[in-house]
């Protein structure tokens, strides 16, 4: 049954569009030429550049991968106490903004931040044993 259906669908689609008149084709072309709504500038500025630049210097090919916005933004969670988190050298609470990211949730072990469609989760690292041992010498 599937094989018959797969054979009939392309044949039917060809038959439907085979009887287009010149006027119908001109109407389709006019619709194509109408100005369409594009992407907003804010969204466009936040998108990652899809191109890679290649430089050739003295038989050496250098590939430059563009930095993303997120590579420039460094968020680090240092501590959590109650309903506040110490992020990037400052105590913050829910709904505060840090480097363009709004704090959505503060838990016992981590924080959830949001910037538009981008969601970041920061977690506390394992505690380091930063004690300095002093020994007395004779």
Image (tube, rainbow, N blue to C red):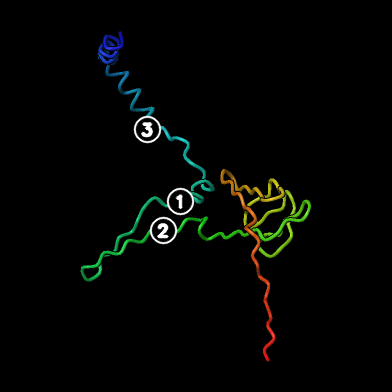
Q: Quadrant of the C terminus?
A: bottom right
- Furthest residue in direction bottom, as rendered: 138
For disc 2, the neighbor class at 10 Å (few under 14, some 14 to 19, many from 20) is few
Mark closest to the chain's N terminus, 2 or 3: 3
Determine the secondary structure under disc 3: helix
Q: Relative to 34, is 107 on the left or the right?
A: right
Gap between marks 1 and 3 measured at Cα: 29 Å
Q: Which residue is mark 3?
A: 33
Gap between marks 2 and 3 measured at Cα: 34 Å
- Furthest residue in direction right, as rendered: 82
Give the camera-side residue of 27 and 17: 17
Q: Residue 48 got which mark?
A: 1
* Contact check, label 2 and label 1, Cβ < 8 Å: yes
Residue 5, image quadrant: top left
Q: Position of residue 47 (x, y in %)?
A: 48, 49
- Residue visible at 31% across and 23% down in the picture: 26
Gap between marks 2 and 1 measured at Cα: 8 Å
Q: Quadrant of the N terminus?
A: top left
Q: Which residue is mark 2?
A: 66
Q: Relative to 64, is 114 on the left or the right?
A: right
Q: Position of residue 49 (x, y in %)?
A: 42, 52
């Amino acid at each position: 049954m599937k094989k018959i259906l797969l054979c009939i669908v392309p044949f039917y689609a060809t038959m439907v569009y085979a009887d287009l008149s010149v006027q119908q084709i001109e109407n389709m072309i006019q619709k194509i030429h109408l100005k369409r709504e594009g992407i907003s500038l804010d969204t466009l500025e936040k998108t990652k550049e899809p191109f890679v630049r290649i430089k050739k210097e003295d038989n050496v090919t250098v590939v430059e991968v563009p930095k993303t916005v997120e590579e420039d933004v460094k968020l680090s969670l240092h501590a959590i106490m109650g309903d506040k988190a110490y992020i990037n050298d400052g105590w913050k609470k829910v709904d505060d903004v840090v480097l363009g990211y709004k704090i959505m949730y503060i838990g016992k072990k981590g924080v959830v931040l949001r910037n538009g469609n981008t969601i970041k989760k920061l977690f506390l690292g394992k505690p380091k044993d930063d004690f300095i041992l002093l020994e007395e010498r004779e």
